[in-house]
Every structure is written in C-alpha cells, then in structure tokens.
Image (spheres, grey):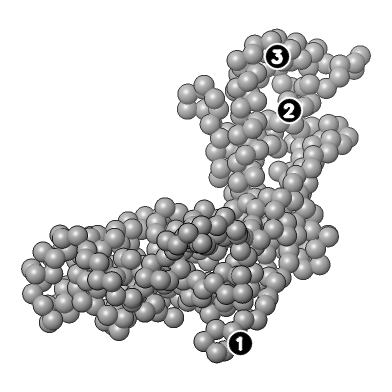
Amino acid sequence: MGFEEIIPLVSKNELDTLYKTHPYLLTVDATQSPLIEKKEAAFFCQAIKVLAKDHMLTVPEKEGAKICLIDYFEIWLPLIVDWSSEIDENTSPEKKKIREILGSHADRKNERSLMCELGNDALSNLSFILDTFTMEMSSPVTRYFWFEEQSIEIGKKNRIDRIVNLYAIKPPCIHIELDGIIRPALRIAKIGLGKKDEFIKMQLPADGSSSSQTTEEYDVYIQSHAWQRFEERIDGVTELARNAFFFFSLANNKLFRFNQTLLIPYIFDTLKLGYFTADFQDKKIILRTCLFITANGTPEGQRLNQYTGLKKLDKKYLVIDKLSAFMASDIRSNPQTAGIFIQSGCKDLLNMTTPMLLKKKDFELHSLDPKQFLHYLSIKEDIGTITSRCEEPPTQTGETSQPEK
C-alpha cells in the first residue's frame, strides 16, 4: 500500500495492542428512535460488518493488491493514526523510524494522493453499504430506516470510534378515493445516508400540450394493494434486494405515458422486470398497482399481444405473469420461444444471472414450459406465421389496453 518498508518495523507488542483496542467498523446508535429495538440496532451493525468484510477495495497503482473494507477501517486506518501520533521520550525507536518514513511519504505527492484516493474510496463504499442496507430493510408498508451522517471520535490510545445514528418512522398514510372506494395510500420516502424525513417527489411527463410543460414536483404515494402485487409478481428474488431496487427505481427513473396511463419502470439490478402504474389525484402521484413486464398495459406486453394474440387470461394460464416462471425455465434452449420474448422487449427475462436470486427450492415453483408455450400458440395460429410477425416492427394500433390490477 505504498509503505512496504514499514512492515518489518511493526513490533508484535504493537500488533497485540491493536488487536485488543482496535475500533469496530462502526457503532450504530438507535437510542433516539423508539421504533427500533436494541437488538435490531445490533443486527444492523453486525450485518453491515459482514457486508464490509466481503467488500474489496483496490489499492491504487498496486497491481492485484486489494484490502477488504473492514480491514481498512479496523486495522490500516488505526495504524496510520497511531503512527502519526506525537513522539515523546517513551516512543520506541521503531515507531520513530516509522514516523520518519511517513514524513518522507508526505513529500511524495503522488503516493500521498493515492492514499487519499484509497481513503475516499473507502468512505464512499461504506456510505454505499449504509444506503443500500437501509433500502433493503425499508418498506412503505412497515417502516423506513435512515442512517445519519457519520461522526468520528478519537478517544484514549488514539482509538477511532465511528458512530452512525439510526432512525425509523412509520410511513405517513392518507386516504384517497379510487373507483368510488376510500383506500389508504402510503407516502414513499427517499432512503439514503443523511436523508432523514425526506420523501420522493416526481414530475409529471408532458402530454403534448403547452400547458403541461412544468417542472413542478409532486409527492408520491403507493397503495398497499400495489405493494402486494409487487411481491406476488416480482417473486423469486430476495425480499431485501427487491425492496432496495424499488427505492433505486423510483429515485432514478421518470414517469412516462403509455396509452394514457402513467408508468414508471421497475429495474432490478440492470434488468427491467415491470412497471408501476400511477394516477395523478389531488396534486399527488399514487402508485396504483405493479405490472409484470409481460402484462397488459406495458409496452412489452402490448407487443407480445400483437405478435401472439395472447390476452390476460392466456398469460395467466401459461404462467408468464410472474418472475419465478422464467427463473425456473430454460427458455433460451428453445430458439422459437426465446425469439418471441426477445422481439417483444422481454430479453431481460432470459438473462436472470444476478446473485440476488433465490434458489428454486426457496420459492413456489411455477415453470414455463417452452414447448407447451409453442403448442398453446399453435392452436390459434401457425407458429411460423407468429415467428415471422415477430421479425416485423410492432404496429401502433391506437387502442388503449386496460392495465391489470
């Protein structure tokens, strides 16, 4: 890491002292939030420590050299602080020599900047872990979690204590009238480090009229029904990952209009798996339901319908209305079936290689049989005709398809 000449000077006694007094990666303080139990705060701390152990930092300009995030904060950084402490009559010759080396490195601007780069990278990665973990643990139907900015305290023996405050709130709830029925709607928070009590806001897409050109942003709410459909249709992935990418999707995507319906994509990792439909009511954006990517009411679902003639009940019968069916199937082994979904815009369903998937034994198995799928289509129309149609650009019918609920 740029200080190889220091290693032989580090005594066993110094390493023993470091082992006994080294700081934890961080301390989670949840005492200011009555919604968080002490054991939950301990779980947060332990889980983040596990994530940091698996998170590797690349040492700049040291080919192949890596250090895990937790070792950087718990071992390397405390050593640097200790070696940089004031020298007195009790300082060992070895530590004095180390201090001289550190001083000489301070004059080597390139190496110094590289060490700063590593430190900034470590802080950035730790912040990312904190952000992601609070997204994973948060839900608009239970609680939202936030970490406040880190504070660093240097105590006795130059021990570094990194403290983050953890907060939780229940999602604010309002009641709205949809289809003549009063329904609860839950406000969606903006989850992230230092974003306590911030909430998602979105702009409406332009509808083509001059009066619609506005930059005004509106609060975003979700029906509990929409969250239930979300869990049902985006199945086969871990709950934590599904939650995290819900907040990522809302923070990084925009609403658009499709057949007069407001949609926002749900992106899991890099895979587009579906959409949330939205209504605009009383100057609020209400997420009404979650549609799987093959469903009626999505651009891909409409193309699938144009190519194959499959309606909502057909898709349900063939079990192509939820993620697990594609995870449990080897569609790529059948070029005709794969081609239909690829041309419809559903290619991401054939590329489910993310490590955040559940094992097949961990969820109810609903497999899509590629041969059965083609046989079902052949009852209505010759497969050759369908596959030929898939090679043509989709037509714009002008029809307004009815979204699923």
Which sits earlier in the primary sequence, circle 3 or circle 2? 2
Question: What's the distance in space between the residues labelled 3 and 2, CA to CA?
Answer: 16 Å
Q: Residue at x 39, y 77 (%)?
A: 403
Residue placed under numbered mark 2 in the picture: 79
Left or right of 89, for residue 277: left
In the image, residue 259 lies at what x, y percent? 37, 70
Disc 1 + disc 2, Cβ < 8 Å: no
Q: Residue at x 25, y 63 (%)?
A: 344
Task: Label 1: state its secondary structure.
Answer: strand
Task: Check the picture and name the quadrant holding the C terminus.
Answer: bottom left
Label 2 packing within 10 angstroms: few (<14), some (14-19), many (20+): many
In the image, residue 390 lies at what x, y percent? 17, 63
Which of these two is toward me, 307 or 136? 307
| Number of callouts | 3
**Can you tell which quarter of the image residue 36 is in?**
bottom right
**Can you tell which quarter of the image residue 7 is in?**
top right
Residue placed under numbered mark 3 in the picture: 106
Residue placed under numbered mark 1 in the picture: 182
Above/below status of 370 relative to 110: below
Task: Label 2: state its secondary structure.
Answer: helix
